[in-house]
Amino acid sequence: MLTGKYALVTGANRGIGLAILKTLAQHGANVIGGARREGSLDDVCSELSDSCGIEATPVYFDVSQPDQVKAAFQKITRITKQLDIAVNNAGIMDSSLLAMARSEDIESVFATNVFGTIYVMQYAARMMIRHKSGSIINLSSIMGVNGAEGQVVYSGSKAAIIGITRSAAKELAPYQIRVNAIAPGFIDTDMVSSISEEIRRERVDSIKIQRIGTPEDVANCTLFLASDNAAYVTGQVVGVDGGMLV
Ligand code: NDP
């Protein structure tokens, strides 16, 4: 489905990002795994190269640091001149009540989730504009669509992703670059592991499909949006939430 394409996935060393990296590689893409912890993707990339017969290369950078993003893209342009797919997955959550949120947490959530997404999109778009093709996929959240108590900061950052996605979709469509967002619901990763059993049960009860989502559920939607099967899909926010908002 993606044979010969080059795909960057940020935050690819665990959770949803890792599932996306593996799924794109299993469908023939050469993958560039972004992670901030040096060495954290070395083994995964060599396993994917062997098992999928593709090029898998780790690039270590923190998306919230513009100098590191710039240096990462200098490395990426040495790997490929044509970036076909960029998945902005790296993200952090904050669960403070509005009155309790600390300024340093507000700043770090926006620096990673919002500024990091914009920095990566800028460099990815520059590469894609040259070839007049590409697909950018940004991870928003059901909370960016609907909000939630105790999530003012996080949901604000994920709502910003929707505005960024829709604006970039308009701006980049003339270059045949599609920009879409995915809004996952409740997905079983480290990000939600600290949630109490009671809240977990309440959330699962609100899911019409009656189960927590898996990272692969999100990866499969990413695969579709990355592929030519979604050639006429841009500016959309696709819920992957088991019907939580129905
Ligand atoms: P995890 O916490 O499991 O993984 C987050 C990933 O992002 C890790 O690889 C982490 O790296 C990386 N990361 C965090 N900050 C940075 C940074 N500044 N620079 C580079 N990498 C960074 O989260 P999930 O897999 O659950 O979430 C992935 C995305 O999906 C996020 O954007 C999240 O907001 C979104 N999402 C998740 C939902 C869920 O229910 N799980 C629901 C809705 C949206 P490290 O290992 O170094 O910390």
Image (cartoon, rainbow, N blue to C red):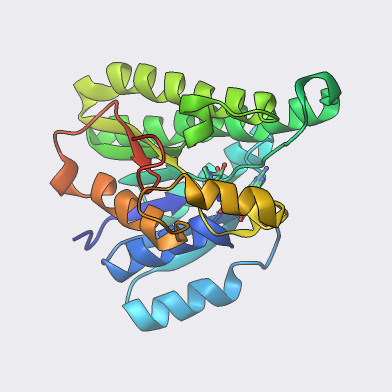
Report x, y in % for residue 136. 36, 38
Up-down relation of residue 138 to residue 223 (above or below)? above
In the rendered view of the protein, which quadrant contains the C terminus?
A: top left
Report x, y in % for residue 85. 34, 46
Q: Give the residue drawn at x 70%, y 62%.
A: 38
- The residue most toward the bottom is 50
The residue nearer to you, when weighing 202 against 44, is 202
Q: Give the residue drawn at x 27%, y 39%.
A: 134
Q: Give the residue drawn at x 27%, y 56%.
A: 5
- The quarter of the picture where residue 109 lies is top right
In the image: residue 209, left or right of residue 140: left
In the image: residue 23, left or right of residue 116: left
Q: Give the residue drawn at x 50%, y 56%.
A: 16
- The quarter of the picture where residue 25 lies is bottom left
Q: Is residue 192 visible?
A: yes
Report x, y in % for residue 115. 61, 27
The residue nearer to you, when weighing 75 against 94, is 94
Report x, y in % for residue 86. 40, 44
Total numbered labels: 0
